Image (cartoon, grey):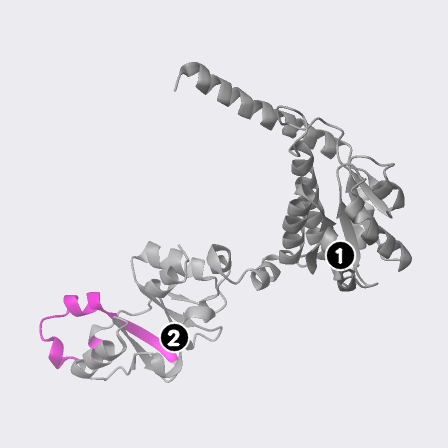
Amino acid sequence: MSSQVIEDAIKAGRDVLHTEARALHRMADNLGPEFAQAVETLTGLKGRLIVVGIGKSGHVGRKMAATFASTGTPAHFVHASEASHGDLGMITQDDCCILLSNSGESRELSDVINYTRRFNIPMIAITRVLHSTLGSRADIVLALPDEPEACAIGMAPTTSTTASMALGDALAVAVMRRKGFDPENFHIFHPGGKLGAQFLRVSDLMYTGDLLPLVQEDTPMPDVLMRMTGTGYGVAIIVDGQRLTGIITDGDLRRNMDGLMTRRAGDVATRNPKTITPESLVSEAVAVMNAKKVTALCVVNDTESLSGLIRLHDCLRAGVV
């Protein structure tokens, strides 16, 4: 590949990015009270947000609905053409509609527009042309910047779709803030994958009850070893009633090999082991284990009573790194 080809490709890419960036800056600078009105409408919504579009705007609409749904505003996408063939029944008077059309003249939207007007369903338009059919009939109009498309012939939806998607993100985030949507709420809608793993609590992964390798201070070491082997956790936890008094690890066994089998648990244990609470994030437990170079932590409650055991292996398997 020649240097000229490389330079031309890079220039084309930069031109697109600069064109779309200018449009986003212009849209941000011109954001007005209509945006705040839209945020209030969506914050007080009793039903669901219905996002409607066609073509490339339809693809943007699907992403927009998914973003709202994942951030605390029930939402789904309705394809404009399907709406005319029965899917209008998905829209109720408690809902609010966002309709997307760069030109504001997409004829496939006409049935949805008429439906919202007939049943007094709030409608927010996202369009470049304020006085278009869509813009003139909407309750709230959010204007896209009147900037050229970034493609070589100025026709393929590029700048307009980027602006639409960014405006949808801005709306969703503003509504999130208005509702006080916090990390706990976020975890409810994102229980899987890396995002969900970040919000796992120690109580979600810890071992409890009969699964715990519990021994007493005077338990003979042969019995301690049997308990450690039986659970496979590599540790034994010494308790006095519900009170944690120590822990025995593989390292403790190696340090006490001389006469080990004649000793008792209390003779071998590490006292005052590092602990964590059930409400702590699993990521905090991993940080503690890494810092202390251990592979398990005892879990204690507010009264310092033993609640469970959490292992590094299980944290990593859950996706917490």
Q: Earlier in the sequence, mark 1 or mark 2?
A: 1
Residue with the mark numbered 1: 83
- Secondary structure of the residue carrying tag 2 is loop
**Which residue is at the front of the view, 123 or 250?**
123
Q: Which residue is found at the position 17% from the left and 70% from the top?
A: 253
- Label pair 1/2, CB-CB below 8 angstroms: no
Q: Which residues are magenta?
A: 243-267
Where is residue 94 shown, x and y percent of the image? 81, 63
Where is residue 215 shown, x and y percent of the image? 28, 82
Residue with the mark numbered 2: 207
117 vs 79, left or right, is right
Where is residue 9 shown, x and y percent of the image? 49, 22
Determine which quarter of the picture holds residue 159.
top right
Q: Which residue is found at the position 18% from the left and 80% from the top?
A: 221
Q: Which residue is found at the position 84% from the left and 43% from the top?
A: 134
Q: Which residue is found at the position 67% from the left and 53% from the top?
A: 65
76 vs 196, left or right, is right
Query: Looking at the image, is 294 positioned above or below residue 110?
Result: below
Where is residue 162 shown, x and y percent of the image? 65, 37
**Which residue is at the front of the view, 273 or 152?**
152
Query: Looking at the image, is 215 positioned above or below residue 68?
Result: below
